[in-house]
Image: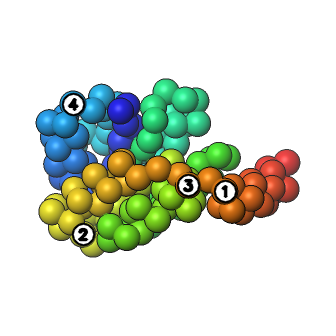
Amino acid sequence: MKISIGSDHAGLPLKQQIINHLKDKSHEINDFGTYTGESCDYPDYALKVAEDIKNGNSDLGILVCGTGIGISIAANKVPGIRAALCSDTFSAHACREHNNANILALGQRVVGEGAALDIVDTFLKSKFQGGRHEKRLDKVAKIEAKYSK
Ligand code: RB5
């Protein structure tokens, strides 16, 4: 699978752990930074990953900041992006199965490495179930369209 990933400085160590983990599993990784521990702004990395997903360059995205909150809020401003902040594996599969989430957001200061890697694996292997969930996502898209003028 082709995966885009990005973080701010607060998410950098976990981003690197996720990259190592996914490379070991032979996934193709597009790393949009940040690459150093210097303080930076999470919307810049949310935008890079969200646009890469929107343009169809990758299958799914992963974003990390201190809490996962700011970076998921920013990514969700890009039309067509459904970024889900997860701290547990139930949410990680439900957000794919029910919400067709195309980006997973994680908080480096919230989840430890072991839990985070389980969440990543669960997110990547889960599939959208369609059916009744499709209709609900159509309604979400209509809200987005209403305010995208
Ligand atoms: C950076 O200190 C921190 O505010 C950021 O990583 C994130 O947690 C914001 O939501």
Frontmost residue, 58 versus 75: 58
Q: Earlier in the sequence, mark 4 or mark 2?
A: 4
Residue highlighted by disc 2? 111
The disc at residue 4 is none
Residue highlighted by disc 4? 26
Residue highlighted by disc 3? 129
Q: CA distance from mark 4 to mark 2?
A: 24 Å
Q: Residue at x 32, y 71 (%)?
A: 88
Q: Earlier in the sequence, mark 2 or mark 3?
A: 2
Name the secondary structure under disc 4: loop
Q: Is residue 6 left or right of residue 23?
A: right
Q: Is residue 140 left or right of residue 86?
A: right
The disc at residue 131 is 1
* Amino acid of disc 2: Val
Frontmost residue, 99 versus 69: 99
- Residue 29 screen position, x and y as percent: 30, 32
Q: Residue at x 52, y 42 (%)?
A: 50
- Of badges 2 and 1, the one in the foreground is 1
Quadrant containing the N terminus in the rendered view: top left
Contact between labelled residues 4 and 1, with CB atoms less than 8 Å apart? no
Q: In the displayed structure, would residue 111 be above or below residue 63?
A: below
Q: Earlier in the sequence, mark 4 or mark 3?
A: 4
Q: Is residue 125 left or right of residue 140?
A: left
Q: Is residue 64 visible in the rendered structure shown here?
A: no
Q: Is residue 118 visible in the rendered structure shown here?
A: yes
